[in-house]
C-alpha cells in the first residue's frame, strides 16, 4: 500500500518563508538569497516526507506566494497592467501580481478564500481574447532538483478545471471558451514534468462542489484523456478534496487517470459509490488523515475504512494519503511545550501526520507492535479528560429549549420598543475597533509578558477608551464603541477567556503570501467562567450619554477561525460557544448596555461547497447566532456585522438571524450588491459600509453622499444606517478622523435633505 501527502505547508517551522519574503520586499535580501531560502525549505520538507517512509515526496506544492498564482503564470494569463514587468525576473512579476505596485499605480490581482478554508488565493483574471504568455511552472525545476537529490517525486499542480472555474472572466464572455489554450499550457507542463516524476497529481477540488456548469463537467473526462497522454511516463493522479464527488463520480472515473484521490474526512459518504464503480486499472487513494486539523488520527476508526477498500480492490490498488494538502495545518508539534499535556497528547501537525500514514499502512498490512493501543490511549484518554468533557456544559446544551432561539416579539414590533434609544434618521456608527496604535500594542505585549501590573494595564486601556469616546463624541457619531484596544484579535480575545480553548506557541498556518495566522484550538467543552467584555463596555458607557455598543464575536466566527476538536459535531461545539456568548449578552443587558453587536464576520466563509450541505450548515449556524442573541428584551437592540459582500444567495438566511441591525461590506462594490435587497424584502435595518477601510484613502464627502444616495434606492430611509465597511484597527488615526468627518458631514447633509 503506497503512502503520500497531497502537499506540505511551505512556510517553514519558524515561518522562515515569511521572513525571507518580507526581507526581499524590503530590499534587504537579494533574489538569489530568497531562492536559497526557498530551496532549503523544500529540501527540508522532502526529507521529512522521506524520513516518514512515504513513497513519494510532493514537489510543486511549494510556492513563493500562492499555488493558484503559480498556475496562472504557467498558463500565462497575465493581465495587461502587469505587462511592463513581463520581461523581467519571474519573482518580481509574481510579487507585483500578488501585491500590486502602489508606486506605479498597479493594483494587485484580487484575493479570495480557497473554497471553505482559511487560505486565500489570487484570483486569475481573464479577458475574452487573452494573449497568454506561459511561464515555466516552478514544479519543473523543483522536480529536477528533488530527483537529483534522490527523492521519488510526485508533482502537485492545481488542475485546469479548478483553475479556470476560480478565474474571473469579464462579464458577458464565457471563460470556458478558453479551456483549449489552458489545456495546452497544462499539457506542455506535464510533458516537462513527466521525466522527473513518478506521479503527477492534479488537484480538482472543484469536482466536490456543485459550481461547474453541466456542460463543462461533460468535457472533463476527455480533457483529462489528453492530459494523460501528455503525462506519459508518469502516473497521473486526479486529486479531489474538501467534500465528496457526488454527481461527479462518473466523470472522475472516466478520465482514465491512474489514481483517483478522494477526501474521506469531508466526504466520507462517497466511499462505497466510488469503490463499486472504480475501473479495474485505477488505483484509489484514500484521504484518511485530516489535512485541516491538528488532531491525531483515530486509528481504530480509520482502519475499518481502509479494510473496506482493500476488501473491494486488493491492497495494491489502495493508497493512503492526507485528505487534502497539509497547507492548512501547522508544521510541527515538536516544541509545543506550553500546551496542557492531555491536549498535546491528542495532537498531530504536518510532520506528525506524515508518520501517521506510515503507521496506518503498517497496521493495515497486519503489523502492530502496540501502535493501535498507544493511539487509542492517546486519543480516547484525552477525549475522556474532565477538562474535555464537562458535564455541566453537556447539561446546559441538552436543556436548550425552542424559546431560547426566539426573541419575544417579531422585528417590526421590537423597533417600537427600541424607540427609547432616540436615534436620529440615518444613525451613524462604526464597526467596533479603532486604530491599534503602537502604544496599544506595546501595552498589551507588556501585560502578556508580565511586565505590566493588571492595574497599570487596565489604566492604560481605560485611557485609550477615554480618548476613543472623546473622538467619537467630537465627530458626532450616534452609537459609540469602546474601540477594542484590549483585543489582539476578535477570536483569540474570547478564546483566551473561555474554558475548552488552548493556544499553541508556534501553530502558524499560511493565510496568504507572507501572512500567517495562529488559530486557537478548541479541544474541550466550552464554558464561560465570567464576564469577558463587561468591564470595558461599562467603563466606556460611563463616559458618555450616547449609547455605547457592547461588542462580541459570534459563535460561528469563533468556530470558523479556530481549530475545532474532532470528537464532537461542529454544530454542537458551536452551540456551546453560543451559550457562553448568550450569558455574556445577558450580563451586558443587565448592566444597562442598550445595544449589543455580535459579529459574524465568518458566517459565509464556513459554508460547505454544495447547496445541500450548505443548507444544513446555515441552519445550525443561524440557530447558533439566534441562541447567542435572543435572550434579550425587545428594547435591547442587537446588531451583527458581516465582512463580505457576496451574500445575495444567503440574504434570506441573514434575515433568519433576526438581528435588528446588520452592517455589511459594500463600499467597494459601489453599493451594487444592494440590488439583492430589491428582490428580497429584508425586514431589519441595514448599514451598508460607505467607507472602504481596507485602503488608507480618505473618501471625500461627496463620494460618501453618493453611496448613501444609491443605498436609499434599495433601503427604506427609516432603516438605513451609516458606517464604515469594517473595523478600523488596521488604519491610522490620521486617516480615520478625516474619513469619519467626511462620513458625518455626508450624513448631516442627507438628514437635512430627507427629514
Ligand atoms: N468588531 C470587529 C472590528 O471592528 C469586527 C471585525 C471584523 O468584522 N473582521 O474590528
Ligand atoms: Zn468586517
Image: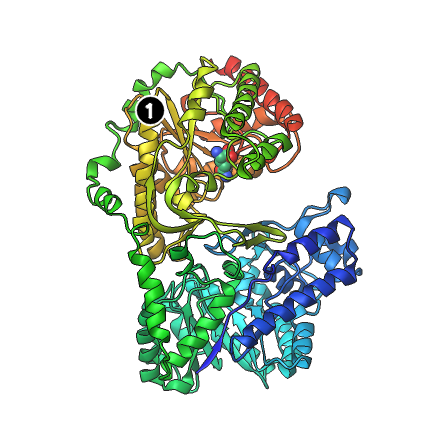
Secondary structure beneath dot 1 equals: helix
Q: Quadrant of residue 31?
A: bottom right
- The N terminus, quarter of image: bottom left
Q: Residue at x 35, y 19 (%)?
A: 592
Q: Locate residue 588, reporting x and y percent.
A: 35, 26
**Residue toward you, 348 or 198:** 348
| Mark 1 beta carbon near ligand 1 (under 8 Å) | no
**Image spot of residue 388 (x, y percent):** 32, 52
Q: Is residue 414 left or right of residue 424?
A: left
* Residue 523 appears in view: yes
Q: Residue tagged by mark 1?
A: 589
Pick the residue in front: 478 or 365: 365
Q: Is residue 45 left or right of residue 614?
A: right
Rendered view: 532 above or below 186: above
> Toward which corner of the image does residue 274 lie, by quadrant?
bottom left
Q: How is the image coloured?
A: rainbow
- Looking at the picture, tell me which residue is in the foreground, 628 or 584: 584
Note whether 151 is above or below 43 in the view shown: below
Examine the image and state in which quarter residue 166 appears. Answer: bottom right
Q: Is residue 629 among what the camera can see?
A: no
Tell me the crowding category of disc 1: few under 14, some 14 to 19, or many 20 or more residues within 10 angstroms, Cα based: many
Q: Residue at x 36, y 53 (%)?
A: 614
**Residue 383: image location, x then y, percent:** 31, 58
Vertical arrangement, residue 408 with respect to residue 394, above or below? above
* Residue found at x 45% / y 54%: 116
User: Residue 263's spot in the image, x, y percent?
Assistant: 41, 68
Q: Residue at x 65, y 54 (%)?
A: 18
Amino acid at each position: 500500500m503506497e503512502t503520500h501527502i497531497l502537499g506540505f505547508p511551505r512556510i517553514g517551522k519558524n515561518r522562515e518563508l515569511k521572513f525571507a519574503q518580507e526581507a526581499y520586499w524590503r530590499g534587504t535580501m537579494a533574489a538569489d538569497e530568497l531562492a536559497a531560502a526557498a530551496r532549503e525549505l523544500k529540501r527540508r520538507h522532502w526529507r521529512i516526507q522521506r524520513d516518514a517512509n512515504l513513497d513519494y515526496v510532493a514537489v510543486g506544492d511549494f510556492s513563493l506566494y500562492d499555488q493558484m498564482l503559480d498556475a496562472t503564470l504557467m498558463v500565462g494569463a497575465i493581465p495587461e497592467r502587469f505587462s511592463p514587468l513581463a520581461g523581467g525576473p519571474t519573482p518580481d512579476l509574481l510579487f507585483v501580481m500578488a501585491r500590486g505596485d502602489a508606486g506605479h499605480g498597479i493594483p494587485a490581482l484580487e484575493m479570495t478564500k480557497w473554497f471553505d478554508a482559511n487560505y486565500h488565493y489570487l484570483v486569475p483574471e481573464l479577458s475574452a481574447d487573452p494573449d497568454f504568455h506561459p511561464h515555466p511552472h516552478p514544479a519543473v525545476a523543483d522536480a529536477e532538483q528533488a530527483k537529483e537529490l534522490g527523492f521519488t517525486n510526485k508533482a502537485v499542480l492545481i488542475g485546469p478545471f479548478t483553475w479556470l472555474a476560480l478565474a474571473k472572466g469579464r462579464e458577458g464572455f464565457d471563460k470556458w471558451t478558453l479551456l483549449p489554450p489552458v489545456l495546452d499550457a497544462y499539457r506542455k507542463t506535464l510533458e516537462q514534468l513527466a521525466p522527473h516524476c513518478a506521479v503527477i497529481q492534479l488537484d480538482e477540488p472543484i469536482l466536490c462542489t456543485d459550481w461547474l456548469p453541466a456542460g463543462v463537467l461533460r468535457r472533463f473526462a476527455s480533457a483529462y484523456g489528453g492530459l494523460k497522454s501528455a503525462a506519459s511516463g508518469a502516473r497521473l493522479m486526479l486529486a479531489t478534496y474538501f467534500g465528496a464527488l457526488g454527481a461527479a463520480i462518473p466523470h472522475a472515473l472516466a478520465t482514465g487517470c491512474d489514481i483517483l484521490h478522494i477526501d474521506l474526512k469531508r466526504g466520507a459518504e462517497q466511499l462505497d459509490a466510488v469503490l463499486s464503480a472504480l475501473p479495474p486499472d485505477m488505483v484509489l487513494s484514500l484521504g484518511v488523515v485530516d489535512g485541516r486539523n491538528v488532531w491525531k488520527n483515530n486509528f481504530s476508526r480509520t482502519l475499518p475504512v481502509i479494510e473496506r477498500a482493500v476488501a473491494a480492490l486488493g491492497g495494491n490498488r489502495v493508497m493512503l494519503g492526507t485528505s487534502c494538502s497539509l497547507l492548512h495545518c501547522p508544521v510541527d508539534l515538536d516544541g509545543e511545550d506550553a500546551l496542557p499535556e492531555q491536549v498535546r497528547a491528542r495532537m498531530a501537525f504536518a510532520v506528525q501526520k506524515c508518520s501517521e500514514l506510515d503507521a496506518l499502512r503498517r497496521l493495515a498490512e497486519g503489523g502492530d507492535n502496540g501502535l493501535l493501543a498507544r493511539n487509542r490511549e492517546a486519543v480516547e484518554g484525552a477525549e475522556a479528560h474532565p477538562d474535555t468533557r464537562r458535564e455541566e456544559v453537556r447539561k446546559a446544551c441538552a436543556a436548550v429549549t425552542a424559546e431560547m432561539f426566539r426573541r419575544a416579539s417579531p422585528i417590526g414590533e421590537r423597533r417600537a420598543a427600541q424607540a427609547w434609544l432616540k436615534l436620529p434618521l440615518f444613525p451613524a456608527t462604526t464597526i467596533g475597533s479603532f486604530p491599534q496604535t503602537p502604544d496599544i500594542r506595546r501595552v498589551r505585549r507588556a501585560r502578556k509578558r508580565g511586565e505590566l501590573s493588571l492595574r497599570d494595564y487596565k489604566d492604560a486601556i481605560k485611557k485609550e477608551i477615554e480618548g476613543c469616546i472623546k473622538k467619537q463624541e467630537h465627530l458626532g457619531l450616534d452609537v459609540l464603541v469602546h474601540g477594542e484596544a484590549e483585543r489582539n484579535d476578535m477570536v483569540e480575545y474570547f478564546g483566551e477567556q473561555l474554558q475548552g480553548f488552548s493556544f499553541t506557541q508556534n501553530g502558524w498556518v499560511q493565510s496568504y503570501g507572507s501572512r500567517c495566522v495562529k488559530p486557537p484550538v478548541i479541544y474541550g467543552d466550552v464554558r464561560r467562567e465570567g464576564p469577558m467584555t463587561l468591564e470595558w463596555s461599562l467603563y466606556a458607557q460611563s463616559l458618555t450619554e450616547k449609547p455605547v455598543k457592547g461588542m462580541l464575536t459570534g459563535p460561528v466566527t469563533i468556530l470558523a477561525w479556530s481549530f475545532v476538536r474532532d470528537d464532537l459535531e461542529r454544530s454542537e461545539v458551536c452551540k456551546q460557544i453560543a451559550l457562553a456568548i448568550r450569558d455574556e449578552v445577558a450580563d451586558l443587558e443587565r448592566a444597562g448596555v442598550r445595544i449589543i453587536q455580535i459579529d459574524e464576520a465568518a458566517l459565509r466563509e464556513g459554508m460547505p461547497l454544495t447547496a445541500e450541505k450548505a443548507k444544513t450548515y446555515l441552519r445550525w449556524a443561524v440557530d447558533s447566532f439566534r441562541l447567542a442573541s435572543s435572550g434579550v428584551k425587545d428594547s435591547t437592540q442587537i446588531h451583527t456585522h458581516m465582512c463580505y459582500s457576496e451574500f445575495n444567495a444567503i440574504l434570506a438566511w441573514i434575515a433568519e438571524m433576526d438581528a435588528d441591525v446588520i452592517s455589511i461590506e459594500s463600499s467597494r462594490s459601489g453599493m451594487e450588491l444592494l440590488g439583492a435587497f430589491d428582490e428580497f424584502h429584508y425586514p431589519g435595518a441595514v448599514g451598508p459600509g460607505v467607507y472602504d477601510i481596507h485602503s488608507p484613502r480618505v473618501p471625500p464627502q461627496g463620494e460618501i453622499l453618493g453611496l448613501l444616495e444609491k443605498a436609499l434606492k434599495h433601503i427604506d430611509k427609516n432603516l438605513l444606517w451609516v458606517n464604515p465597511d469594517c473595523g478600523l484597527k488596521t488604519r491610522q488615526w490620521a486617516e480615520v478622523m478625516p474619513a469619519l468627518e467626511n462620513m458625518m458631514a455626508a450624513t448631516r447633509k442627507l438628514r437635512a435633505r430627507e427629514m
